[in-house]
Image: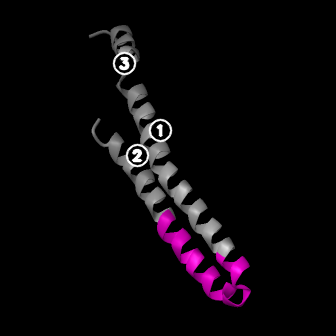
Amino acid sequence: MSLAFQIIAAQADPTSGLTAIGRGIVYGAAAIGPGIGIGIVVGNAITAMARQPEAAGMVRTTMFLGIAFTEALALFGFVLSFIVKGGG
């Protein structure tokens, strides 16, 4: 096979472009859930601190734990987007 034909064949292969799109969709979808979850956690923590200011320290600690666990889901999605590449 000539070099020119190999270059044309490599450019005609849509697999790399589709893989990049797939990785973007996987990570984008994986980031939606944790984003909503963190918003709910922080919103409820603010409401709890406004209702009972004396419990703000405990609520804040629990809020940060909830944010950390929820953010772990986004990291799983990030890793999954790299695993998608492993098929090719």
Q: Secondary structure at mark 2?
A: helix
Q: Marks 2 and 1, Cα distance to the nearest angstrom? A: 7 Å
What label does residue 81 carry, if any?
A: 2
Q: Marks 3 and 1, Cα distance to the nearest angstrom? A: 22 Å
Q: Secondary structure at mark 3?
A: helix
Residue located at (46% from left, 44% from top): 29
What x and y, as percent, mark residue 70? 49, 65
Please give the range of residues in magenta: 48-70
Mark 3 residue crowding within 10 angstroms, few (<14) / some (14–19) / many (20+):
few
Cβ–Cβ below 8 Å for labels 2 and 3?
no
Compared with 54, 1 (above or below) is above
Which one is earlier in the sequence, the residue at label 2 or at label 1?
Answer: 1
Residue 56 left/right relative to 3? right
Compared with 6, 30 (above or below) is below
- The residue wearing badge 1 is 24
Amino acid type of the residue tagged 3 in the rendering: Ala
- The residue wearing badge 3 is 10
